[in-house]
Image (tube, helix red, strand yellow):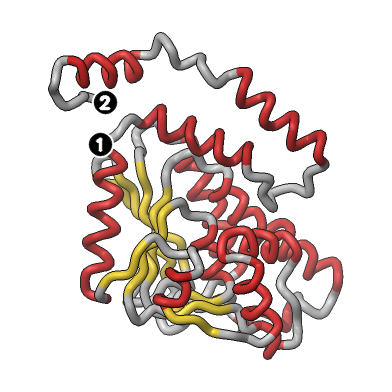
Amino acid sequence: MTGAIEFEQTGAVGSVTISHPGRLNAMTRAMWRELRSVFEAVQASTSLRCVVVRGRDGHFCAGGDISEYAAFRFEEDSLRAFHEDEVWGGLQAMLACDVPLVAQIEGHCMGAGVEIASCCDIRIAGASARFGAPIARLGFPMAPREAALVMREAGALTARQMLLEAAVFDATQMHTRGFLSRILADDLVAADAQATAARVARLAPQAARRNKQTLRALNRGPDQYQSAQSAINSVAQVLSNAYTYASSDEHREGVIAFVDKREPRF
């Protein structure tokens, strides 16, 4: 069966499902392009307040679909296009998304799975989840932007071990290393991810989007090889718009509701 990136929405909460039956949800080239399209649509949505990113049938994503690799990996131009346009196009769309993202991680989270999870804001994993990027066994390195993303989110030591010794880590190790928000029994992960998304969705959506914009500007991420000056410019742009929400209905409602001792209606 071919793979797909599936999207569904219930109220203010969306779910993006990585689906490739029989391949542990390995990412095909078409799936990377779909990932980009889905998250560009999420970014443009005015009704979504949180999105859960998950895999089908008990696994998050086992990496890339290696069965496709011989068709394009052996020529520099096609290899570059794959990583810089298709893979990074999907990851960049996630990183640029202002809607909060919750990763529901179960089973295999390898290579592309680690990269996709690294784009999420809150990461919840099952106790049996496994993490790694053992591509050294396949004879190639991780693309620079992708390596920068994984190193930023998982830590330099973890990235080095994944890439240089093909190390695979369990959920407890990844939690200790700061990659995971929390670990739960496998059968509780899905419900907890949905409950987390529901909590986020009840909070102020404008504030959530602005927080993501601010954090993105302050964190010199791998979405572009920034100079020091461009990083300063990014922060300056955020600062220039930092308080334009002052007269917004959401801001007013949150403060007044607190004073009135009632739940805010965002």
Foreground pick, 106 / 150: 150
Q: Which residue is mark 2?
A: 266
| Label 2 CA crowd tier, 10 Å (few <14, some 14–19, many 20+) | some
Give the residue type at disc 2. Answer: Phe
Q: Are marks 1 and 2 in contact (CB under 8 Å)?
A: yes
Most extreme residue toward the top, as rendered?
247
Q: Can you see residue 239?
A: yes
Q: Which residue is mark 1?
A: 202
Among the 4 quarters of the image, the one containing residue 106: bottom left
Residue in the image at 46% along x and 33% along y: 209
Q: Quadrant of the N terminus?
A: bottom left
Q: Position of residue 41 (x, y in %)?
A: 48, 42
Residue in the image at 85% along x and 75% along y: 75
Most extreme residue toward the right, as rendered?
76
Q: Quadrant of the C terminus?
A: top left
- The kind of secondary structure element at disc 1 is helix
Q: CA distance from mark 1 to mark 2?
A: 7 Å
Compared to residue 75, the image places residue 168 above or below, namely below
Q: Position of residue 191 (x, y in %)?
A: 22, 61
Among the 4 quarters of the image, the one containing residue 218: top right
Query: Left of 39 or right of it: where is 64?
Result: right
